[in-house]
Amino acid sequence: MLGQTFYHQTIRKYVALFGTLFNDINIEKKDSGGNVLSRQKVPIAYGPKQKFLTRINQDASLDRQVAIQLPRLGFEMTGMAYDPVRKLNTIGSLTHKESVNGERNVKKMFNPSPYIFDFSLYAFVENAEDGTQILEQILPFFTPEFNVTVNIITDMGLSIDIPIIIQSATSEDSYEGEFSARRTIIWTISFMLKGFIYPDIKSSQSIIKTIEVAFKEVAEANASDENNELLLETSTPFAQYQFLLETGSFLLTEDSTTELGQDNIISKITIVPEGGSNTYITPGDDFDANTTITVYNPPVNYNEATGTYE
């Protein structure tokens, strides 16, 4: 879409994360003395509730599929919606630096879009005691949210905390028909996962290490020109103070339409890292810089073809 093909498997990771939270739940049977008679791990699988109910009600004969054993857990993602409350600056970005075989590589990605993912967890049990055992191994950890750290974008080295918030827990006894029919109690627990969807990654981004700013003297503005002057920090809405040159002219900003050529330059400021422009720098590094101010008297012109002041 929009000329970009990429896939971070973000939604797949959210689904796997949710299912992993509940893959170590066990049911214990005890005697009157509190001794453990049996311990059974509750299996979990992804799928809609009706699929599990169909398998539970299968006739376990030689020519039919075997009915699944209870207890069992199932879960599914039921929907997703944009979350405007957590919206980030659209033009903000994330950067990741790495060195491969001595070569510097910088990766950049714009801020992700926040989304809320709705999940439902189903607990299928044959009796009420098994259902309460499962619930008591889940509910105490959600107050009402449970945070999990996920390595969400490996190429960017990006790990984030994902809050999973519990919404509700309801029960349903699907017993119908004769007394010989199989009874199934279903607990449905609803959750909300607050995640992000990430855009494509831009590679081999250049790092700006040298800055050169030229200043020039401008003539009087015409009536049709837009004359926007550089103001001092001491300016207020009621009193504006500009950069005034000895000649009586002002310095203009880039959106001015007055005298914005490449001639009549009176000075320039150059900022270069210590060690020169070829110094190895990666994003996030702290480094010292050398600042040079060059004054031209008389003024000079900038030659764009050669990149020199003449």
Image (spheres, grey):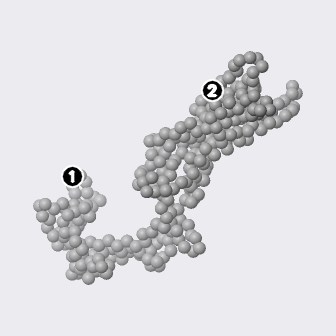
Give the quadrant of residue 186.
top right
24 vs 93, left or right, is right
- Name the residue nearer the viewer: 257 or 22: 22
Q: Is residue 257 left or right of residue 112?
A: left
On the image, the x and y values in percent for residue 35 come to 87, 31
Q: Report the Cα–Cα distance between label 1 and label 2.
A: 64 Å
Q: Is residue 15 visible?
A: yes
**Disc 2 residue crowd, few under 14, some 14–19, many 20+, Cα 10 Å:** few
x, y percent for residue 85: 45, 41
Find numbered disc 1 in the image and state the secondary structure of the residue it sits on.
loop
Q: Residue drawn 64% across and 31% down? A: 50
- Taking the spot 77% from the left edge, 38% from the top edge, the residue there is 41
Viewer-nearest residue: 126 or 99: 126
The residue identified by callout 1 is 238
Q: Residue furthest top?
A: 178
Would you place residue 80 above or below residue 61 in this image?
Answer: below
Side of 176 relative to 180 (left or right): left
264 versus 108 height, above or below = below
Identify which amino acid the numbered label 2 is placed on.
Thr
Q: Nearer the viewer, residue 71 or 130?
A: 71
Mark nearer the N terminus (1 vs 2): 2
Residue 268: % across, % down: 30, 75
Residue type of the residue flagged with mark 1:
Phe
- Most distant residue in the left direction: 223
Residue drawn at the location 22% of the way across and 57% of the way down: 240
* Residue picked out by circle 2: 170
Which tag is nearer the camera, tag 1 or tag 2? 2
